[in-house]
């Protein structure tokens, strides 16, 4: 099996000097390696090709054969690392918590250690004595570990 640490170090070196960053390296027992990268401005095909060439230079196929896929984090992919949370501050996000609550709101902040984030959720609330409900926005702090996923909220108008 290919050394995952070698792949991670190789990808990090290949991305130095760019605004791209490593999100995840996954591998299967039959040596299928998937590398997911992201960027503050977008990942292009040239970046993926450069990372692929760097990995192929570091991990010799003659020693151990493997299948390699390098791609960007997709629009529907969940956020996985702190830097993804940071780049999405101000964006509409969809969150599913481990206890089954689903909510949509604006990502307001992420803690310095990346363990928690704040989501501004707008809901209809019927105030006592009022005839009609009003829209209220509340900031909810959530732990990343308590969420099944946090991803872009895509709405079509």
Image: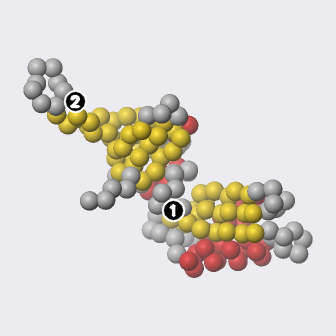
- Which residue is depicted at the point 63% across and 78% down? 49
* Towards the viewer: 125 or 79: 125
Determine crowd level at label 2: few under 14, some 14-19, many 20+ residues with C-alpha closer than 10 A: few
Residue bearing the label numbered 1: 74
Residue located at (37% from left, 34% from top):
140
Quadrant holding the N terminus: bottom right
Q: Residue at x 52, y 34 (%)?
A: 98
Q: Quadrant of the C terminus?
A: bottom left
52 vs 1, left or right, is left
Point out which mark residue 26 bears.
Answer: none
Q: Does any portion of residue 9 appear in the rendered image?
A: no
Residue 46: x and y in percent read 57, 79
List the residue tagged with mark 2.
Answer: 125
The residue lying furthest to the right in this view is 63
Q: Position of residue 72 (x, y in %)?
A: 55, 66
Looking at the rendering, which quadrant does residue 66 occupy? bottom right
Q: Is residue 126 left or right of residue 96?
A: left
Report how far apart the C-alphas of labels 2 and 1 lie in the structure: 35 Å
Q: Is residue 154 in view?
A: yes
Q: Is residue 66 above or below residue 81?
A: below
Task: From the viewer's side, name the closer residue of 52 and 124.
Answer: 124
Residue 123 image position (x, y, % from top left): 26, 36
């Amino acid at each position: 099996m290919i050394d995952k640490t070698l792949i991670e170090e190789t990808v990090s070196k290949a991305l130095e000097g760019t605004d791209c960053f490593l999100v995840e390296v996954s591998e299967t027992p039959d040596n299928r390696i998937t590398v997911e990268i992201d960027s503050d401005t977008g990942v292009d095909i040239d970046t993926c090709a450069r990372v692929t060439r760097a990995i192929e230079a570091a991990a010799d196929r003659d020693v151990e054969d493997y299948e390699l896929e390098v791609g960007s984090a997709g629009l529907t992919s969940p956020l996985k690392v702190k830097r993804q949370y940071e780049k999405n501050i101000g964006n509409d996000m969809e969150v599913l918590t481990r206890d089954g609550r689903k909510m949509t709101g604006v990502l307001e902040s992420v803690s310095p250690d990346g363990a928690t984030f704040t989501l501004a959720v707008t809901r209809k609330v019927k105030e006592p004595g009022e005839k009609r409900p009003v829209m209220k926005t509340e900031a909810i702090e959530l732990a990343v570990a308590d969420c099944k996923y946090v991803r872009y909220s895509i709405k079509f108008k």
